[in-house]
Image (cartoon, rainbow, N blue to C red):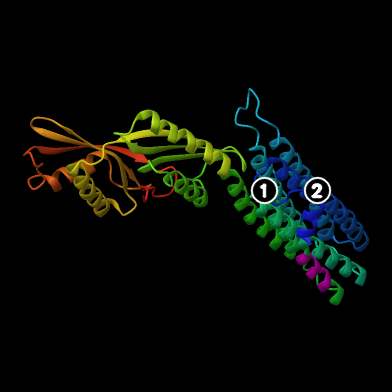
């Protein structure tokens, strides 16, 4: 069913990275959400008024708010598709995140209001008069919400949209809340003296509040800034390392300005003995290829490194082994170089430590100096002094060196 909708209403639906296709996904999902939620609102409101069930009326109001959320989602996709301008050079794609946050917050508000009305119903219960038609219509409404949740989830996963996934979770909550309403109505139908309407509503409201708080966090995280997803880091790293002439990479930063708007910077190590114009030409080609193939605006800082220095290469391996033994296997280092003097040799490098590591610049330098003192004399008799710069990991991945 969902694939048929894509075929009929979304041209080129498989090209999910294209801004126009993303907009079409959001437009179709929003329009179908508005129509179905308004239909459910009218249906449940009629049933609730006829049966005298406050929980059914509250559930109907919930569907009306869902229609409003669908409008917000639709508006978010429309605004996010606007091109970059002088005031917003990175585009407007984060509007999609904002719309997802608004939907999640609206779900939280509905959960609180439903809890309030349920408590009032527990304190002052009112008899309800359900009929078989009431039960059938509520069951049909549950089926419609299940279909709606599946649509949002399918579309949201296809384009990686937090807004649509938030709407899917909201629709799933509606399935649970309407099911609880149905159970209370069945109980009232079978046992006229039994009224659990308020208790069911309160249980559902607590579930909605807890799940909506999780949704608020999930939709707010991209706005605050999080680690890039491992798949993006892996693809980008493998792509840059695949070029002859790139010896290693480090200091990867990925900035997300929306699901289809990503910018990145990375340091690429090249042989210092190679002509700088040749290396620069290589870097330009990589940047263009990455944008064409991965859709990422990449800026590469070129780091020339000295190769073929036996002392430096051997010491680098020993230092890395010592760092990982002390501070964990996720430690990496880069920009390793020796500055030789008449009486001593300075060993300079940058170390990337995991978040929360108790080690710092002073403690690492002291550890290495102690470990390599005495036995750690250079072949020329000089002493090694370690000068470390601590880097922060912004990619959540251990970057490495080219295999070729």
Residue 190 forms part of the magenta stretch: no
- Give the mark nearest the N terminus, 2 or 1: 1
Point 89% across, 68% down: residue: 130
- Mark 2 or 1, closer to the camera: 1
Q: Nearer the viewer, residue 361 or 107?
A: 361
Where is residue 344 drawn, in percent x and y? 11, 34
* Residue 77 falls in image quadrant: top right
Point 52% across, 41% down: residue: 290
Where is residue 154 drawn, in percent x and y? 70, 57
The residue carrying mark 2 is 67
Q: How would you rate the neighbour count of disc 1 (Cα within 10 Å): few for under 14, some for 14-19, many for 20 or more?
A: some
Where's the N terminus, which quadrant? bottom right
**Residues rendered magenta in the picture:** 179-187
Q: Main secondary structure of the magenta part?
A: helix
* In the image, residue 194 above or below residue 361: below
Label total for image: 2
Where is residue 50 drawn, in percent x and y? 93, 61
- Give me the C-alpha separation between circle 2 and circle 1: 25 Å
Regarding mark 1 in the picture, which secondary structure is present there? loop
Q: How would you rate the neighbour count of disc 2 (Cα within 10 Å): few for under 14, some for 14-19, many for 20 or more?
A: many
Q: Which mark is residue 16?
A: 1
Q: Nearer the viewer, residue 139 or 361?
A: 361
């Amino acid at each position: 069913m969902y694939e048929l909708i894509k075929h009929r209403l979304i041209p080129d639906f498989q090209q999910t990275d294209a801004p126009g296709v993303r907009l079409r996904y959001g437009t179709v999902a929003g329009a179908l959400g508005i129509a179905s939620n308004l239909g459910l609102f009218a249906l449940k409101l009629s049933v609730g008024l006829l049966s005298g069930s406050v929980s059914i009326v509250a559930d109907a109001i919930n569907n009306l708010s869902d229609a409003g959320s669908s409008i917000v989602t639709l508006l978010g996709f429309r605004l996010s598709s606007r091109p970059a301008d002088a005031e917003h050079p990175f585009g407007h794609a984060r509007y999609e995140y904002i719309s997802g946050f608004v939907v999640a917050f609206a779900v939280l508000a509905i959960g609180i209001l439903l809890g309030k009305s349920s408590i009032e119903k527990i304190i002052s219960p009112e008899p309800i008069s359900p009929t078989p038609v009431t039960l059938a219509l509520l069951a049909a409404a549950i089926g419609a919400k299940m279909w709606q949740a599946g649509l949002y989830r399918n579309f949201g996963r296809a384009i990686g949209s937090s807004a649509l996934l938030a709407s899917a979770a909201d629709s799933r909550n509606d399935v649970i809340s309407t099911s609880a309403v149905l159970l209370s109505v069945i109980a009232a139908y079978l046992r006229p003296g039994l009224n659990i309407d308020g208790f069911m509503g309160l249980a559902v409201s607590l579930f909605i509040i807890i799940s909506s708080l999780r949704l608020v966090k999930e939709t707010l995280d991209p706005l605050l800034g999080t680690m890039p997803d491992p798949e993006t880091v892996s693809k980008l790293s493998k792509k840059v390392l695949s070029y002859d002439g790139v010896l290693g990479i480090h200091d990867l930063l990925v900035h997300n300005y929306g699901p289809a708007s990503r910018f990145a910077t990375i340091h690429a190590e090249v042989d210092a003995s190679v002509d700088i114009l040749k290396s620069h030409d290589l870097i330009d080609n990589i940047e263009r290829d990455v944008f064409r193939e991965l859709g990422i605006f990449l800026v590469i800082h070129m780091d020339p490194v000295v190769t073929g220095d036996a002392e430096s290469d051997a010491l680098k391996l020993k230092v890395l082994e010592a760092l990982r033994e002390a501070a964990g296997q996720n430690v990496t280092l880069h920009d390793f170089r020796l500055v030789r003097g008449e009486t001593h040799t300075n060993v300079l490098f940058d170390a990337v430590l995991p978040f929360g590591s108790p080690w710092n610049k002073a403690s690492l330098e002291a550890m290495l100096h102690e470990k390599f003192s005495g036995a750690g004399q250079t072949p020329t008799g000089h002493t090694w002094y370690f000068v470390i710069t601590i880097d922060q990991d912004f990619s959540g991945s251990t970057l490495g060196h080219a295999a070729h």
